[in-house]
Image (cartoon, rainbow, N blue to C red):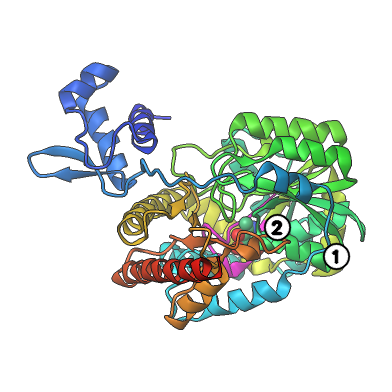
Amino acid sequence: MKRYEVLADAIAREIRSGNLPVGSRLPSLRQITAQHGVSQSTVFRAYYLLEEWGLIRARERSGYFVAPGAGISLPQTPQPAQAPAQRAAALAQSAKVDISDLVFSVLEAAKHPGFVPLGSAFPSPRLFPLQRLAKSLGQASRLVNAWSTVVDLPPGNEQLRRQIALRYLAIGIAQPIEEIVVTNGALEALNLCLMAVTRPGDVVAVESPGFYAALQAIERLDLRAVEIPANPVTGLDLDALAEALQTQPIRACWFMTNFQNPTGVTLTVEKKKALVELLAEHDIPLIEDDVYGELHFDSDYPLPARAFDKKGLVMHCSSFSKTLAPGYRIGWVAAGRHADKVQRLKLMTTLSASIPDQAGIADYLQHGGYDKHLRKLRGALRSQLADMNAALTRWLPPNVRWSQPSGGYFLWLELPATIDAMQLHRLAVERGISVAPGPIFSARHGFRHCIRLNFGHPWSKEIEEAVRTLGSLIEHAGEANGQAGDQAG
Ligand SMILES: Cc1ncc(COP(=O)(O)O)c(C=O)c1O
């Protein structure tokens, strides 16, 4: 890490922890150079970076100030997902899953092109280098030789797998290329992993709240789910997982360790290590979904659990869908000791990922400036987060709390307990706004007073207006439900 990045990180932490509150003036150049023993140009570069992250703003002739909505010292940090008694009840049994109808009805609303996409799972396509990518695709497909159709069958295009392995190496993971299987997006990778390590009737541990596609895969494969609480601030409850491993015949875990969907939470390195150790003791595979890992706001990629795996038990799944090319449907899994099985399942189900698209992405990774694009994308997401924070602070009632992710593009909001997120979703849809209601993120349709919001779109007056509308819907629903409660009581 460069000196100015270290300095920017240190100041960013001060802002996020609230030690430097919104509106406060940053120390002068002279103070900072003396304090940190760095040159003025290092301080300038750090301040430019913080500005790019949306954390500070310059005021003419007055210096730098913490930006409105930056970082941020919000008191609204969501509470643990479940009380201990509820947790014990949830862990006591695994459940069959029936989530698909609910998810499909919600996703249908989010698909509408005219809607303000606060419920969407995708970032804006405007943030992707589509033209440069098309150039790579054009070039690569002209060069694809007739035998590629055979040679690039699973595990997949060698150039692409080499480029993916190099990205692992860049974060310190020596990933054998033979264990990387290219798939149709991360979702296929995750599903193939689940098929590789379970049989119908088996029990799988998932997070709660967690990504609904995990629940759908469990439902489709006739498995059973044990929901492990995931706290929006501290992440997966490892004690609960340890307890579940003692009491349930768990065959596999499907977790996100970085920028979890829906809460945005990232596990600390210590927790990731402890998770890997715990699963290694029980010899249980971890299907690790890391699709948002590259979208980190601090300078470094937060190491996934895969980095601490010594037994080949972690199956690390990711894709280019959230960072580069959503429509290309190119993902992969570094499948450890299960790589052969995953590769065979890939052949037996969809045979192969598109050959030209694999070659196109390989060419882009090699020549297209992926890292430069990622830096820009992260900067855009950071500043959109600052705008979203500011809008939420401005328009939402004070009793709404939300998470502060350090990457990705989701915020998890806890509304007052009187608000029904499904009702809010319906009212928002009537006004041309999508939101993702809490119940789609749990097998038991819990989190009825929570919603997930997407900040992956360039800030606009439509988004600001949509947040304002949400604020007034929440306020009125709260008043109406509160009154109904008073009358009933
Ligand atoms: C957490 C998570 N995992 C996996 C996926 C699927 O990724 P892909 O589009 O690469 O299949 C998504 C997409 O919404 C996601 O949010």
Front residue of 3/360: it is 3
- Which of the 4 image quadrants contains residue 64? top left
Ligand 1 found in image quarter: bottom right
Q: In which quarter of the image is the C terminus?
A: bottom right
Q: From where the camera sits, is residue 309 visible? A: no
Query: Residue flagged by tag 2: what amino acid is it?
Result: Asn
Q: Which of marks 2 and 1 is nearer the N terminus?
A: 2
Residue 297 spot, x, y in % from top left? 44, 44
User: Magenta region: which residues?
Assistant: 315-331
Can you give x and y, in whole percent of width and height, for residue 25 in the image? 19, 35
Q: Are marks 2 and 1 in contact (CB under 8 Å)?
A: no
The reply, left or right, for residue 338 in relation to residue 440 is: right
Q: Mark 1 points at which residue?
A: 221
Tell me, yes or no, if residue 202 can be seen here: yes
Could you tell whether 177 is left or right of 440 in the image?
Answer: right
Give the labeled residue for mark 2: 157
Whether 328 is among the magenta residues is yes
Residue in the image at 81% along x and 42% along y: 244
